[in-house]
Amino acid sequence: MFKYFASIVFFAASFLMIAQPYQMTLKFQNGNADGALIGKRFGEKIFFEDSVSNKLNLNTGFYSCIQNGNILFDFMVLDKGFKISYDFQSQSAEFADRLNDEFFNNLKAVQDSPGFVQNLSILTKEVMKMFYPQITVSQNEFKTHKSLIDSTLVKSLSYELLFFNSPFLNQALDFVYGKCVSPDYDSAYFSCNNFLKEIKDENMYRYVLNWMLYNYETSKVLGSENVFIDLAVNHLKPLLTPADTNGYAVLGKAESLGPNRMGSVARDFRFKNISDGSIQNMHNIEGVFKILFFYDPDCHHCKEVYPKAQALHDSIIDRGVVFLAMAVNAAPVQVKEFMDTLNPINSKVLFGCETDDKDFIGKYYIPVTPGIYILDANNRVKARGISLVDLRGLMKTFVGAY
């Protein structure tokens, strides 16, 4: 069951879907229902819907009856009204509705053993599978991501109102995109795009899109940011209005990431070589792999990370790895001081600074320093925005044990 201490949000949520209301009849026995409320479930929140009365008009959705912050019982409204009887003494609800009766009385059994769903009626089975795509996944072997999405999330859209107005949507998205969809760009973006294009309601479309944007923006899997970029540019951008400041902030980040996206050729830049004063182009520096270390000479964290990154490079320099330490918005004298203080005399790190103000920041996404990129021999981006720990692990993957 879903009963727990509930906090109610007392406002009409604009994103909740509007549908035809159905009349519900509630009956209470062996207790007092004074102060009881009906709340609509949406994600992790419960939104105030109405005070308890014998007859209520409720839209399609998932609801809780709450008294003094405690959930007395949960129920769902699909396509008709029905009667519910609650006994305070036994703390149990009786539903004059097969769907609710089977769903809530067998939910734990299905969660523990997905095959148990086969014992339920057709409608209850469909709703269970909508809320728990792992049931379908456990019973089928999908050979393509399209068949996976079509058989789970897309199929659930036949009950779109109920699916959206429930506490299960996030769980379903977490399972399908976290456990089933391959994290590589082609599979992930195709699966996201395939589901989004089937959603009819604008509010649900926006909600799912925002979930996807956050999921792939914060993912630690290499290449996930490419999914974030294309979701923002292809799906978020057409929806934005002048007042949507948060949306434009997300789009702005996506567009700033675009020029040096994973797998693309990194943008070239000119820099001043601190050692000899020459002006060079990054693309002309040869190496099997290049580590670009963007830093600020005054950055305390940069001073902590640099010696460890430099030592890593010196241990694999024989594998053809080149290390470029590029100072952001710094004068040559500052870079020279940083180099003399932290860099060993015999180190092969190439130190440089910008020839034009903001040249690095203008061409590369460097929200904080240090900003670490890895490029291959053809200057294609292999990784970016990574930590020192990530750098160690990735270089071991790229060049072998060291």
Image (cartoon, helix red, strand yellow):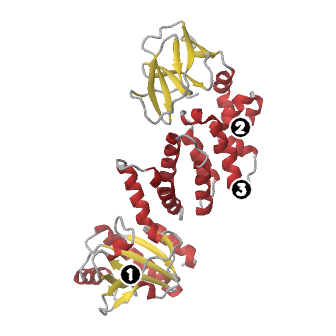
Please tell me which residue is depicted at 59% across the width and 27% down the height of the picture. Answer: 1
Q: Earlier in the sequence, mark 3 or mark 1?
A: 3
Q: Earlier in the sequence, mark 2 or mark 3?
A: 2
Q: Amino acid at mark 1?
A: Phe
Please tell me which residue is depicted at 39% across the width and 27% down the height of the picture. Answer: 10
Please tell me which residue is depicted at 63% across the width and 17% down the height of the picture. Answer: 95
Q: Quadrant of residue 223?
A: bottom right
Instruction: Give the quarter of the figure containing the C terminus.
Output: bottom right
Q: Residues within 10 Å of mark 1 (few under 14, many from 20)?
A: some
Q: Nearer the viewer, mark 2 or mark 3?
A: 3
Please tell me which residue is depicted at 37% across the width and 55% down the height of the picture. Answer: 249
Can residue 91 be seen here?
Answer: no
- Residue labelled with disc 2: 114
* Location of residue 7 in the rendering, given as x and y in whole percent from the top left corner: 42, 28
- Residue labelled with disc 1: 269
- Residue labelled with disc 3: 144
Q: Quadrant of residue 308?
A: bottom left
The answer to whether the residues at label 3 and label 1 have Cβ atoms under 8 Å apart is no
* Location of residue 191 in the rendering, given as x and y in whole percent from the top left corner: 62, 54
Secondary structure category for the residue under label 1? loop
Q: As displayed, is residue 166 above or below residue 50?
A: below
Q: Nearer the viewer, residue 215 or 32?
A: 215
